[in-house]
Amino acid sequence: MADTPKDLAAGADTPRRLYYFNAGFLRQRRVRRIVELAGYELRLGKPAEDDLIAVWGHSPYAQRGEAVADATGAGIVRIEDAFLRSLFPGRTGDMPLGLQIDHRGVHFDAMEPSDLEHLLANHPLDDTALLNRAKRAIARLREAHLSKYFAFDPDTPVPDPGYVLVIDQTRGDASVKYGRADANSFREMLYYAQEDNPGARIVIKTHPETAKGFREGYFGADDANDRISLFTDSASPWELFDGAVAVYTVSSQMGFEAILSGHKPIVFGQPFYAGWGLTEDRHPHPLPRRGRNLTRAQLFAAAMILHPVWYDPYNDERCELEEVLATAEAMAREWREDRQGWTGEEIRLWKRRPFQRFFGHHKPMTFRGSDATRRRMIWAGKAEAGRDIVRVEDGFLRSRGLGAELVPPLSLICDDLGIYYDPSRESRLEQLISERADLRPDQQARARALIDRLIEERVNKYNLGGETPALPKGHRILVPGQVEDDASIRLGAGEIDTNQALLQAARAANSDAVILYKPHPDVEAGLREGALSDESPADLVLTGADPLALLDEVDEVWTMTSLLGFEALLRGVKVTVTGAPFYAGWGLTRDLGKVPPRRMARPTLEGLVHAALIDYPRYLDPVTGLPCPVELAVARLATGNIPHPGRVNRLVAKLQGLFAGQAGLWR
């Protein structure tokens, strides 16, 4: 199988010269950058015969480039958005996550072959690893409710199941014209949707741009009756497909997604996904060059893995589909959780700027008063029991430096049920851990890769480093100290709730062991309570020691509720727990305390990690300010490429402390 022109351009010693005559390429920096990363040099001027000319699909402005190509003999390269683009359509200014760069045609033009069609017709598409990637990516799209544009709420109600789904499009859309269809195709589609399904309800899904008044669709209110209804809400296509008994389309990308969801859509145009045995094609003039039968995974592999050029906005480089999926998941989560806006309560003044960066991208946060249209969050330690409000806390991979030293976090946790360190009530994390008792192969692999990366890069919550002291020989038990007035001790420690008592319990159960005590960093820094008395049962108190280096040298960890117990599990160290931290009670620790009986699931370590580090926290890239996946946060923590707060946060915090009792402004 020969390389595609895209691959040849990317592998060339020098970039291919690519001329353009559309101001859009000049204005859209992201598009220009992706094209450059694909191996092209965008230029203004007059091309030579062996140069190329970039045009946007079959847009009206493409005719300029086509005319120059006719005059000079230069080749045409047609550029279009990839099928997973962004939160919002391009007209909003939202930047794409990928492009299709095509030397033969354009994917929606059935009148001539495209590079994508060439792949579908000629590439073997038989590599097991490639097809497994495709299957796993499809599952991931479905779970995260991702579509070409993904600014919709998956919880938006859809019609009761049992309907026939008819997909509308916008008038004048190029995919209709070049898909060899017209307005009559839509009338015919609606007729046969009723004829083929006697008595069934018909739901017409309007195009998002029609619902927002940007462009006119082919169907309107006049088409609705007792049997036919228009569905205009911005809902998840995956939810709509789940409730449909049949799907009808002309050339919409939703037809492609319907195939991925398990449907065999009835198609009245000739989109790129028709003609491969995955659709019921009603077009009167079939395309003989599309005579091959493909599987869903093969169609997806060509359209989403092999053909597009994907972009990593965090590192400004090309990437694979899986990295784009992680980016889109983070962006979708941010929009879905933050679009209503937040009101923060009991958020200290120095934290407000980081919170604004985390939660105020789509609608600025407020920190005073109440607004029924906004969601409400409170710092978890300030929340009253039973209060119906989202609790927020630092994530488990937080920063390079202590929160008590006012270093802003890279991760925060929002819990709408409880909070992870309070075992008296179920938390969102508990639910996630239970759900991750069964992992797909890609989820298992992602969690395992994350564990390996954390170990290799020596990343933990605060990443303080420290000394690596010489340790006595013997069976070594590490006892991590904790802040004794911390909420996790007050709520989750149980009967043993001081560092001294924990050390005594560890010594009583292990009389011959070497007990190593590592004070909590905040206690060592003199910022919080928890210092030991003069008489300690420990053989050695390790001040200033690197906790990760210690985990490499010990046989066990004994803890009340410390996160170091979780970090020990990641590194294969045996953990004994006297309290009920979030990682206890799942069969992965020796539990001496009372853990909630509701923790019945038995996840693997990878399942626990997926829930605690991938699903539960939100991450913010400190360099770009974008929401990001955990892997990017780990990379930033490992390299230290993180801005530090300097003196401003410290000054604000001191002022707040001085005036906290004087005015609500400082609280």
Image (cartoon, helix red, strand yellow):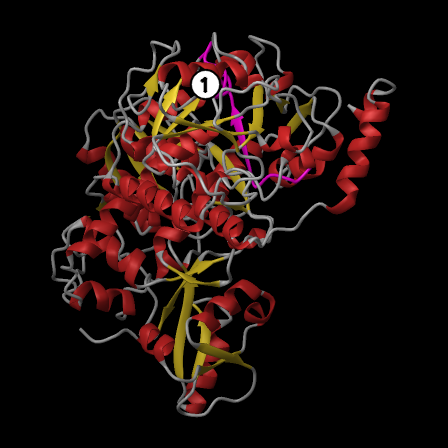
In the image, is residue 300 above or below residue 478? below
Looking at the rendered image, the quarter that the N terminus falls into is bottom left
Q: Is residue 172 visible?
A: yes
Q: What stretch is highlighted in magenta?
A: 406-425
Q: How crowded is mark 1: few (under 14 residues within 10 Å), some or many (20 or more)?
A: some
* Residue visible at 59% across and 22% down in the picture: 483
Q: Is residue 114 visible?
A: no
Q: In this view, does 415 lie to the left or right of 485?
A: left
Q: Is residue 363 left or right of residue 337?
A: right
Looking at the picture, how far across and down is residue 212, in whole percent? 54, 40
Looking at the picture, how far across and down is residue 510, in whole percent? 36, 19
Q: Mark 1 points at which residue?
A: 427
Looking at the picture, how far across and down is residue 161, in whole percent? 28, 24
Q: What main secondary structure does the magenta stretch of the protein show? A: loop
| Three-letter code for the amino acid on which mark 1 is drawn | Ser
In the image, is residue 315 above or below residue 506? below
In the image, is residue 185 above or below residue 9? above
Q: What element carries label 1?
A: loop
Camera-nearest residue between 239 and 306? 306
Camera-nearest residue between 394 and 167? 394
Residue 421 among those drawn in magenta: yes
Residue 596 among those drawn in magenta: no
